[in-house]
Image: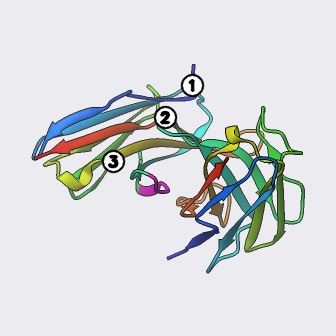
Amino acid sequence: GAVVSQHPSRVICKSGTSVKIECRSLDFQATTMFWYRQFPKKSLMLMATSNEGSKATYEQGVEKDKFLINHASLTLSTLTVTSAHPEDSSFYICSADGTPLQETQYFGPGTRLLVL
Amino acid sequence: RKEVEQDPGPFNVPEGATVAFNCTYSNSASQSFFWYRQDCRKEPKLLMSVYSSGNEDGRFTAQLNRASQYISLLIRDSKLSDSATYLCVVKRNTGGFKTIFGAGTRLFVKA
């Protein structure tokens, strides 16, 4: 079946540095990818919708200059957390839809970010 | 009020018990409905889609009531391995395609 990968699976960085997370669809083309953030014992919260070849759509309250999203190809979207701070520490998960309202939304394994 | 609301949990049940989860959604434009399972520190995984006609997969039965905007999941003969967080998920196409997750209900099945 379809698989979505994320890299890295976990990262520890110093406050003020930038971290890039990659999300790849491995055996299908994803015109749309989604980035979520999940804090401990909380629900997944959609951060932004990444559209291939166009600008990402950010959810209310998500700073687009802090969370840079690039969807340069049909199989790769990247999320860069710029100038990370400890409050950015979270579980970041991407997902991909091959077509809108596709029955199954494929999730990557997630990236655990810890900012010291 | 959240767009997708679930039982807060946690549910603590013995092995073999039957447990039911409820979920309500507020946006009548919602089009697709799912139950996902999320294990601790892992990504969500699709458990089953939910249809008005109801659907069953082994010990799991899901039901959708569009008129009441209500979704349910029934787990029969609970196993220890069923312990996880169950997420009610709704998809809609209003102002762009969106997937809305409920906060999840934690289930603990004990021996």
Q: Where A30 sits versus B82, above or below?
A: below
Q: Earlier in the sequence, mark 1 or mark 3?
A: 1
Residue B62: image location, x then y, percent: 33, 45
Residue pointed to by mark 1: B2
Residue type for callout 1: Lys
Circles 2 and 1 in contact, beta carbons < 8 Å: yes
**In the displayed structure, does residue B83 sit left or right of residue B47?**
left
Q: Is residue B45 magenta?
A: yes
Residue pointed to by mark 3: B84
Q: Which mark is residue B103?
A: 2
Is the residue marked by circle 1 packed among few (<14), some (14-19), or many (20+) residues within 10 Å? few
Residue type for callout 2: Ala
Give the chain letter at badge 2: B
- Mark 3: which secondary structure? strand
Q: Is residue B53 visible?
A: no
Q: Residue at x 75, y 42 (%)?
A: A85
Is the residue marked by circle 2 packed among few (<14), some (14-19), or many (20+) residues within 10 Å? many
How far apart in space, not on screen, are marks 3 and 2 (Cα)?
13 Å
Circles 3 and 2 in contact, beta carbons < 8 Å: no
Residue A15: image location, x then y, percent: 76, 47
Q: Residue at x 37, y 36 (%)?
A: B105
Q: Quadrant of residue A65?
A: top right
Give the chain letter at badge 3: B
